Structure formats: C-alpha cells, structure tokens
Image (spheres, rainbow, N blue to C red):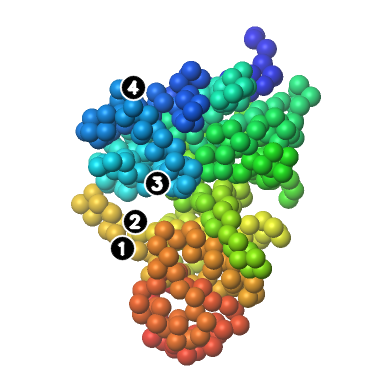
Amino acid sequence: MKPSDTSEKGLESLIVTSLVEDAGYLQGDPKDFDREHAVDLTKLLQFLAETQPDTCETLGILHEGPKRTQFLHRLQGEIAKRGVIEVLRTGIKHGPAHVDFFYGSPTPGNVKAAERFASNIFSVTRQLRYSRTETALALDMGVFINGLPIATFELKNKLTKQTVLDAVQQYQNDRDPKELLFQFGRCAVHFAVDDHEVRFCTHLKGKASWFLPFNKGFNDGTGNPPNPDGLATDYLWKETLSKPGLTDILENYTQVVEEKDEKTGRKKSRQIFPRYHQLTVVRLLLANAMEMGVGKRYLIQHSAGSGKSNSIAWLAHQLIGLEHTGIVSSHATGKALFDSVIVVTDRKVLDKQIRDTIKQFAQVSATVGHAERSGDLRRFLKAGKKIIITTVQKFPFILDEIGDSHLDETI
C-alpha cells in the first residue's frame, strides 16, 4: 500500500485532483499566467473565443499584437477600478463592444442560460509564479474563472510541523501586497489552509493582513469536526469551491463596499467574503423557505462579532428573489414568494449599520426603504418596496396605524 503524502505538495495534489476529477475544473499551466496583467491568458482567450467570437474578431484580441495589449490594459484598469467581482458580474466596454467574462447561474428551465453557464472555464493552477520581478516566487495554488483570478492559497500540514498560522504568516511576511495579483480587488479571497483549519483574507496589507476563520466550528467552539472520510478541511474544495458553490458566493455574497468615516468624511473601500457560518445560515434559511413556504419562524443564535449585519443583508436581498417552485410549460411561474421583506432591528446603531449594508448589497438601491414612521411603511408597502428597514421601538405603532390594509400581502 502506497503511504500517504503528508507534505504541502501532498495536500496540493489532493485538492487539485479533487477539483479536476470531481468538480470539473481544468488544470492550469503556470506558464500561461500573464504576470503583467495577472490573468491566465490561455484560459481567458479560450473562453472569449468560444463564447464571443464576433467580439474577438471585432477587437482583434485573439492574435498577439497591439490590439490584444490594449484590451488587456483596459481589462486590468477596470479590475483595478471596480474589482474582479464586479467585472465578472457586469463585464466591460471596450471600443465598440461589450465583453462578458462570466455567465451566471441559469434559472430553472432556461436551456440557453444553462448552456452559457456550462461554457465557463473554472481552473486551478499549482505553483503559480506570480511576481513580475522575483520570478522564482510561487504560490501553492490559484483558482481562476475564465482566466480571471478568484482565489489564492497557501497550504500547510500539521504533520510537517506547520499549521494554518504558518500559512497566514507567509502571506503577511512573504507576499508583497504591491504585486499585481495581491492588490486590492484583484482576487475575491486569499486562503490559508492546513488539514485542520481554514482562514481567509480579502485585503492583503503585509503584516497588517487580517485573516478570519472559515471553519465549521466543533463542539460549540472553534475549528472543524473530525472527518471520517478524509481531511477535516475538505469541505473547502468539495463544497465551497464547487462550481455551483463558488458561483453562488460570487453572485450573492462577495462585494466591494464603500464605508465613510463619520468624523473625517473620508471614504474607503472594503471587500467582503462570507464566513462559513454565514453561508450556512443564509443557505439553510433560503432552502427552508423554498420548501416550507411563508409563515415559519426561525431562531438564529449568534455571538458578538459574528457578522450578523452581513448575514441579514445577504438573507434579505436573496429572500426577495425567491420564487414559487411551480413550473408551467417548463418555465418557472415567476411569482415571488415574498412581496416585501421587513427588517426590524433593536438598536439605532444596528439599524443604521444594517441599512447601509443592505443598500450596498442590493443590486438596485431603489428597492430598499427606511421606515422611520408609520406613513413611510404604508407608502413603501404600497409602492412595492422590496426591503424595508425599521426599529423595534417604532414597529408596534406602525403596525397599529396601518391596520389590516396589508394583511393580504406576503411579508
């Protein structure tokens, strides 16, 4: 019997094999990584040629030369300005053409959308040489969608006397945040992984890089439960990085948000990626609402600093997108499960925090209303506002005043 490889390379091989053989990824070649633009150029051009051949012809990007270089500069500039998440979601305009870089989750019964989604190229590259100057420097692993970088990984194994903390320190001490791949918004997330724990960071800042846990929790505490079928952290590549799992995160959870310092008035951008418990609670609630319908009650226990504002925001803006599961002539009925979602908070500080968070996450901010008095709530409900935010102190009076006029609404 062949002994298990417990080195970093062994963990690396395990993850890559799983992603390629089970998740349908392609294995990338480190030589295909264009360090000047931080893209897997081969996969990017392959996706564009297969999905938008006319656009490629118009822009002249399939052949090496000034036009391709101009296009790559444009793409790099848009990612620097808006972040890779937004470029994936909305594409870019270049010259006379609009260029798409990702096709999102198809709605049930939409064959064309399903075919488009299947054309996305998810890939994983081992030993990614990322540096424009120190050409021997390499990351353990990188994940790409259609050639655009989504996640980087540093891997460790406790059997070699190194842990996830060593991976964190490697990012903090050895990965220069000025390198193009590590600049803000260039990737959605950076993972530090060993065989027991996962941590992640969305903004590398050298020694100031802040890593949060991406663990399931165990016995009401930190870490992960033992896995009788493999490594305790294999949910990362088997669940989170699966094509549907990663697509869901990119479409509904990741975001670059702008925050304003109330004292100085300065604005700064922050990139958000969900923690494992946030993903779990929102997905469980959405699945149960789809299965059981409206009118159910749920109690969610959380600790301080667990990111409840984001969890509420993610849940609210996905609840308004839920539809009845009835299918007519192979097409979804399109009837919303909820007409409106009302978020009731218990403190003014939390009220503002959740209000700002939901507005940042809602794709259309006009769908969000803040009800400070009963007339607001009545007006918002009548106008069809999808998400309405208020405080518990005002809510009973608002309910009394609007009376039974909206009892036929699903909220």
Q: CA distance from mark 2 to mark 1?
A: 9 Å
* Cα distance between the residues tagged 1 and 3: 25 Å
63 vs 199, left or right, is left
Report the quarter where the N terminus lies: top right
Contact between marks 2 and 3 (CB within 8 A): the answer is no
**Residue type at tag 1:** Lys
Q: Earlier in the sequence, mark 2 or mark 3?
A: 3
Between the residue at mark 4 and the residue at mark 1, the CA separation in whole angstroms equals 49 Å
Helix, strand or loop for disc 3: helix
Observer-nearest residue: 86 or 193?
86
The residue lying at 54 percent from left, 76 percent from top is: 390
Instruction: Tell me if residue 129 comes above or below residue 252 in the rendering.
Output: above
Residue shown at the point (59%, 56%) measured from the top left: 268
Residue type at mark 4 is Glu
Which numbered disc, 1 or 3, marks the residue that appears first in the sequence? Answer: 3
Q: In the rendered image, which residue does mark 1 sit on?
A: 335
Residue 14 pos. (x, y %): 58, 22
Instruction: Measure the C-alpha gap from mark 4 to mark 2.
Output: 48 Å
Location of residue 220 in the rendering, given as x and y in whole percent from the top left corner: 73, 50
Q: Name which residue type carries label 3.
A: Arg
Q: Are marks 4 and 1 in contact (CB under 8 Å)?
A: no
Specify the label residue 89 is tagged with: 3
Residue identified by numbered label 4: 64
Does dot 4 land on a helix, a strand or a loop? loop
Q: Of tags 4 and 1, which is closer to the observer?
A: 4
Q: Earlier in the sequence, mark 3 or mark 4?
A: 4
Viewer-nearest of labels 3 and 4?
A: 4
| Residue occupied by mark 2 | 325
Q: CA distance from mark 3 to mark 4?
A: 27 Å
Specify the farthest residue to the front: 66
Q: Amino acid at mark 2?
A: Thr
